[in-house]
Amino acid sequence: MNEAITVIGGGAIGGITAAYLARAGYEVIVVEPWFEHREAMKENLVVEGCRGIFSTPLDVISPEEIQGPLHIVLLAVKSMHTEDVMRKLSPMLQENSIVVSMQNSINEDLIAEIIGRERTIGCVVGWGAITDRAGHLSQASLGEFVIGRLDGHADERLLKLQKTMSLVTDTYITDNIYGFLWAKLLANCAISVGALQGKPVADLVSMPEARVVIRGIVSEVLDVAFALDICLETIHLRFEPEQYIVQKDLITESLLGVLETTHGGIVPTAYQDLLLGKPLETNFINGYVVRKAKTLGIKTPLNYFLVNIINEMAKGSREIKKENIIELYNVCR
């Protein structure tokens, strides 16, 4: 018998994942605070996009209704909510329970501090999606899951999780989850640039000034990854730290190519959240790099200024416009 799966966060990633698992016959409970979305998903969640369209009702509850024991937890909440959510869930976990972080940024260390490394599993989501409206989600790009334990060890629990998550999309196990997480962070830091003008990724990478800014953003992230001795890795590429200095251009061009060909339809999450008046994760993406860099004595002015610009946009003191990218472009010159 399959273990029950609890998905914390019924947004684009969590909701679509839950829908595929429910269709495959798993017992799935989604925890979602947004009332209209929660009620719509109970009746019939519509999933469409690059993989076609289907609909399915889901078992959805509010955060106040969640009860233990919890077995498999898929964590799909914004990074700023990680600590509060995990402290609430911790007493509901069993000894062999696992929490899979399907989030942006790198939250695995924080999760592990609360529930232990042995119950924490990293997950890189290689596909993008958006919430169109309550009860209606759209997958914007194709991609895979990459999962791994923080110590790199693969065991029976991880193999079983791979089988389960493969019902959603191709799922791979890695012994270098931090390398995959930093590679995803690198891409997200670049995509954040698109929020400055409110355009999809395809529009972003076609703008010469934006490409220059992205090169600068990527260079700073690579400097931090090098200092931390992170071996960046994706499904198709692997870069040892000593390669970062001499192959920055190759890494950047590879990333730009992937963004253009695979993720061009993605609208930056920060821009989506700006439109909806939701809290932004930029402080946990580009801001994460800035904080790590500060502890290492590394300067990251482009990521720093980008975070400040987006925070000003969130406060309403700055407009969403192309000139924001030009401002960062001038910093690069």
Image (tube, rainbow, N blue to C red):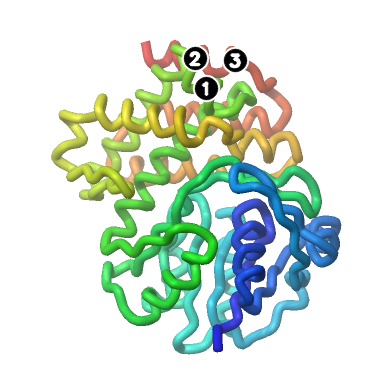
Q: Residues within 10 Å of mark 3 (few under 14, many from 20)?
A: some
Quadrant for the N terminus in the image: bottom right
Q: Quadrant of residue 90?
A: bottom right
Q: Which residue is disc 1 drawn over?
A: 204
Q: Which residue is disc 2 drawn over?
A: 207
Q: Compute the Cα span from label 1 to label 2.
A: 6 Å
Q: Is residue 108 left or right of residue 224?
A: right
Q: Is residue 205 left or right of residue 239?
A: right
Between residues 297 and 45, which one lies in front from this camera angle?
Answer: 45
Q: Residues within 10 Å of mark 2 (few under 14, many from 20)?
A: few
Contact between marks 2 and 3 (CB within 8 A): the answer is: yes
Q: Secondary structure at mark 3?
A: loop
- Residue 89: percent from the left, percent from the top? 60, 76
Contact between marks 1 and 3 (CB within 8 A): the answer is: no
Contact between marks 1 and 2 (CB within 8 A): the answer is: yes
Instruction: Please say whether residue 287 is visible from this viewpoint.
Output: yes
Q: Residues within 10 Å of mark 1 (few under 14, many from 20)?
A: many
Q: Compute the Cα span from label 1 to label 3.
A: 10 Å
Q: Earlier in the sequence, mark 2 or mark 3?
A: 2
Residue at the image position 45 percent from the left and 13 percent from the top: 209
Amino acid, disc 3: Lys
Q: Earlier in the sequence, mark 1 or mark 3?
A: 1
In the rendered image of this protein, does residue 23 appear above or below residue 77?
below
Amino acid, disc 1: Leu
Q: Secondary structure at mark 1?
A: helix
Q: Which residue is disc 3 drawn over?
A: 322
